[in-house]
């Protein structure tokens, strides 16, 4: 079993983070104002964050196409469920899907349809099949889904938890499909029913915070989503819900610890890797907006700058790190899956590079991230780049190149590359009236006329 599988055996991703990066190896519809806001969002497309050169565009297009190939080939055509991981060369016999990878996969289908990567209607039909299965056959409790399931049957595996955050990632994909295929009545209805049946209040058990998950054998997990991380999407989905929402006060209940590194001050949990600054931003367009606490897009820009400088500080120990070769986030390693990164130093760093660290940060530091990714491709060639794009991780110092890709890391790379290039995922997802309502209730200011670019 890999780490994602170990999570399914009772160790949640957040519990791993609380262990300060210890390795987890192989064993281990609204009122007129809201309608007006939604209409404004639809008529004011989200702009890309950077103007890439022709060569950079060509590279990013190749990266996105390869990444999408994973979501097309590693999803069961009947259920739409996407494998948690696969051999980077394809033809993988493992049969475990993750609902988070499926959420990324649904969004990838929208990108593919927009870019005509498949024959007309193919992506739409795959979306229909997936939503039908999610509504009618995939086991759920109060609308929440189990973290890991069999990709052909949907049956729960490894006694995994019913996961609130992974359900949220799945729902982001569901709602993206509802908006992209908005003229398709069946998709619109299916997506709405899947979202509306979630009992968000049940996952709080009367408290202000959402709980990590639930197991039929032992009940609710002990941990809550209480400190800033990728959970922004979870709370906004719950606050904006048409049915069984949680109050907007829950948005203010979580902690937002301040952290400073080389003069950069931003909200950051020192026990968390870089992906926590990426995932919610794959769908929610926070640019040019802020609540009472922060401009979260700029916060992720600062976090990415700090992470890049942290990687550069490791050159004395790992000489291959450099201006155009950096990036560490939760990933595979030669000893199994590890939650690692920095600053501050998190986990048993050994010089391994993780392409999704830069891939998932493309909107935040476009030029730096695309140069890093192109350097990885050019310098390490076929050892680091396979059928589905980059392998999950590799270590130039030891010659280890991971054999697998992991769905969520492939997914964040694809979505953020598309957002950096066109803003398509942001523009599509943010048409949702529920998300407009959620951000308003959470206290976000009206988007400025010209969203700021970073980098």
Image: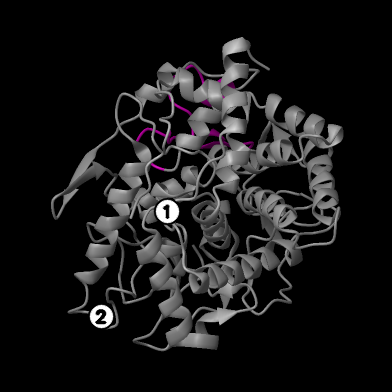
Q: Main secondary structure of the magenta part?
A: loop
Identify residue for label 1.
275
Task: Please state, as top left, top right, bottom left or bottom right, where the N terminus lies in the image.
Answer: bottom right
Query: Dot 2: within a 10 Å radius of its alpha carbon, few (fewer than 14), some, or many (20 or more) residues?
Result: some
Colour scheme employed for the rendering of this structure:
one colour
The earlier-in-sequence mark between 2 and 1 is 1
Horizontal and vertical percent position of residue 278? 44, 50
Q: Quadrant of residue 251?
A: top left
Q: Nearer the viewer, residue 149 or 215?
A: 149
Number of disc labels: 2
Q: Secondary structure at mark 1?
A: helix
- Span of residues in magenta: 201-229
Task: Please state, as top left, top right, bottom left or bottom right, where the C terminus lies in the image.
Answer: bottom left
Q: Nearer the viewer, residue 59 or 436?
A: 59
Q: Secondary structure at mark 2?
A: loop
Q: Nearer the viewer, residue 153 or 421?
A: 421
Horizontal and vertical percent position of residue 380? 46, 86
Identify residue for label 2.
318
Horizontal and vertical percent position of residue 338? 41, 64
| Residue furthest to the top | 31
Query: Dot 1: within a 10 Å radius of its alpha carbon, few (fewer than 14), some, or many (20 or more) residues?
Result: many
Horizontal and vertical percent position of residue 144? 65, 34
Which residue is painted at 26% across and 49% down in the image?
270
């Amino acid at each position: 079993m890999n780490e994602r599988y170990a999570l399914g055996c009772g160790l949640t991703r957040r519990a791993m983070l609380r262990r300060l990066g210890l390795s987890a190896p192989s064993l281990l519809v609204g009122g007129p104002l809201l309608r007006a806001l939604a209409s404004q969002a639809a008529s004011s497309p989200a702009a890309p964050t950077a103007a890439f050169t022709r060569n950079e565009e060509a590279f990013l297009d190749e990266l996105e196409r390869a990444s999408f190939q994973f979501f097309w080939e590693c999803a069961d055509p009947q259920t739409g469920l996407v494998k948690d991981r696969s051999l980077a060369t394809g033809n993988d016999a493992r049969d475990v899907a993750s609902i988070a990878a499926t959420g990324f996969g649904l969004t990838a289908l929208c990108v593919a349809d927009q870019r005509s990567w498949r024959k007309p209607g193919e992506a739409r039909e795959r979306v229909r099949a997936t939503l039908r299965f999610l509504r009618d056959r995939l086991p759920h409790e109060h609308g929440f889904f189990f973290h890991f399931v069999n990709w052909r049957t949907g049956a729960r595996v490894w006694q995994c938890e019913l996961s609130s955050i992974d359900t949220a990632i799945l729902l982001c994909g569901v709602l993206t499909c509802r908006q992209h295929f908005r003229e398709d009545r069946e998709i619109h209805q299916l997506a709405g029913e899947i979202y509306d049946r979630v009992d968000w209040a049940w996952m709080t058990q009367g408290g202000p915070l959402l709980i990590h998950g639930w197991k039929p054998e032992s009940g609710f997990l002990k941990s809550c989503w209480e400190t800033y991380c990728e959970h922004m999407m979870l709370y906004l989905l719950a606050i904006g819900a048409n049915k069984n929402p949680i109050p907007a006060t829950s948005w203010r209940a979580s902690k937002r610890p301040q952290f400073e590194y080389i003069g950069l001050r931003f909200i950051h949990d020192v026990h968390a890797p870089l992906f926590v600054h990426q995932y919610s931003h794959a769908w929610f367009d926070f640019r040019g907006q802020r609540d009472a606490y922060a401009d979260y897009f700029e916060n992720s820009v600062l976090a990415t700058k700090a992470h890049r400088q942290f990687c550069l500080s490791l050159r004395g120990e790992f000489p291959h790190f450099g201006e155009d070769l950096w990036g560490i986030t939760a990933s595979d390693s030669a000893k199994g899956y590890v939650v690692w990164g920095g600053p501050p130093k998190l986990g048993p760093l050994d010089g391994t590079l993780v392409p999704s660290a830069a891939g998932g940060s493309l909107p935040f530091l476009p030029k730096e991230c695309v140069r890093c990714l192109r350097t990885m491709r050019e310098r390490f060639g076929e050892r680091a780049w396979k059928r589905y794009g980059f392998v999950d991780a590799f270590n130039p110092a030891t010659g280890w190149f991971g054999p697998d890709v992991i769905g969520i890391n492939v997914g964040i790379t694809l979505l953020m590359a598309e957002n950096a290039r066109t803003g398509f995922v942001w523009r599509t997802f943010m048409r949702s009236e529920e998300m407009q309502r959620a951000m308003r209730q959470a206290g976000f200011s009206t988007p400025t006329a010209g969203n700021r670019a970073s980098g």
